[in-house]
Amino acid sequence: MSDTIRSSRAVESGSGHPAAATSAARPNARYWRIASRRLRRFIPLVLLLAAGAPALTQHVLAKPPTATVDKAPAVIGVRDMQLSADYWIKLQDKPNRVILDEQAIAAQNARLKSSDPSVHDIEGLPSVFTASQVRDWVEKISTTPKRTLFDESGSEVSTSALSAIVGNTALDAIAAQTTARHGLVVHRADLRTFPTRMRVFSTKGDTDIDRFQESALFPGTPVVVIHESRDGEWLFVISSLYAAWIEKKYVALGESAAVFGYGRKSPSLIVTGATARTVYTPEQPQVSELQLDMGVRVPLLAGWPANQAVNGQHPYTSHVIELPIRREDGSLALVPALLPRTADVATEYLSLTPANLLKQSFKFLGERYGWGHAYNTRDCSGFVSEVYRSFGVQLPRNTRDQGVSPALNRIAFSESDSREKRQAVLKTLQVGDLIYIPGHVMMVIGQENGDTYLIHDTTGITYRSRDGELVRAPLNSVAVTPLQPLLANGEQTFVDRIYSIQRIRP
């Protein structure tokens, strides 16, 4: 029997401190020295065994390992391992091949600017607009709703309420001539159909898709201002990809040279994470915890003095960047801000490769779907636009414009084309190819077991279960799904509804 065990038994049978024993029962001094040494060796072992007891018990009582059984997927055709960019990267023959280099991307962007009517050359817009030009811009987006709309409480929006909203566009106040003003967006801001924050919906109780929500603009985006709402709280702006209403408080007005020169400053940082946030600062609240979304480019103040504080903080743990703010009078100022070195950013646009496309798109996996960039997130076309923007590739804002853009490498389908023809083309698709059905866009991430797999930002999918039951999965997120099982309605599949495929490659 070991000394440890013998000591253990001695301790367990004791009745308290040795001083409590009678003198007749007290051992001699040599005995106590030996027992004390043994006890000191024993106590750490007791503590160690106690700490490991649950693990030891679990190990002893655990059942022998059994064969792994695949659980039923939460979404048809999708296993947990497929919810990783690495899974799809490993399936690529040449994951790091460059699809388009910097020069090819610049050429494609130039084609987009010159040939796509949905893209605006805002630097080339006139300095003065006529009344009819202003009215045309506004009425393209702000048309009086003809259908019944509901508010967030489920009540029908009254005719008088709609009249007041439409009246706030102040079309009757447009001057004979309007001098264009220029500005930079200072905070992520919604673009609205009308100059109002009121949210309206097509169906009572369905409050995800706000019919007055158009898009969003990000910090540093240049805009041309051509009109103002009657209440003075909103501006009608033209950006390179969209024209709509934005809250005035999010636009700083400045000289055109400063506005358009901001985005050309070098060196710069590109946001390559889903989002990045500036450091909190009470000294300059306008640049405190400011959200910058994927693909946003900001000037880097590389020459900032090493020991000069930025908004009360030493800059050595952060990047010093330059951001626009709006002064109290509405004018533009450019100020330093800190972006943590832990932020997912790069000093130049990423190389457009299959591996990088997969990595970038999966950074949004699980993000909530936001119609028109609502919920501070994005929708299907915004999702693919922001992924490609991290490579410097520009796309039109909406699916209807992306799907038919003449600047891209397009495969078009007509209603007379068979499902077999579409399926044959699907087999040839590569990572990053974009598939369009009416109102939706999906990005290809790979092929497996005869199915084309996608990542897309979606409200939900419909398919038939293995027993033939119709299943509606309200995903409301950036999700991975196979294409072939998805149903557009009771008669047609998504494959049947494909009208366009855009390939961002030669």
Image: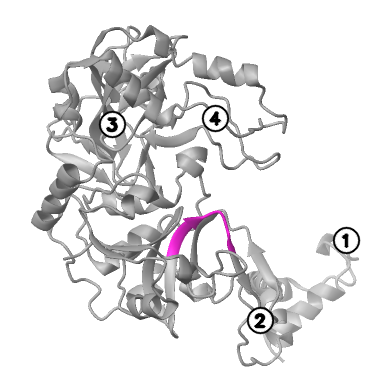
Q: Amino acid at mark 1?
A: Ala
Question: Which residue corresponds to mark 3?
Answer: 239
Question: Tag 3: Cα neighbours inside 10 Å, few (<14), some, or many (≥20)?
Answer: some
- Position of residue 364 measured from the top left corner of the image (x, y, whole percent): 43, 54
Q: CA distance from mark 4 to mark 1?
A: 93 Å
Q: Are marks 3 and 4 in contact (CB under 8 Å)?
A: no
Kindly identify the residue that appears in the image at 29 percent across and 14 percent down: 131
Q: CA distance from mark 1 to mark 3?
A: 89 Å
Q: Are marks 2 and 4 in contact (CB under 8 Å)?
A: no
Question: Which residue corresponds to mark 2?
Answer: 466
Q: Amino acid at mark 4?
A: Pro
Q: Quadrant of residue 492?
A: bottom right
Say which label, 2 or 4, has the lower sequence index: 4
Q: Residue furthest front?
A: 416
Q: Which mark is residue 20?
A: 1
Q: CA distance from mark 2 to mark 4?
A: 43 Å
Say which label, 3 or 4, has the lower sequence index: 4
Does 119 sit left or right of 186 as displayed? left
Q: Are marks 2 and 1 in contact (CB under 8 Å)?
A: no
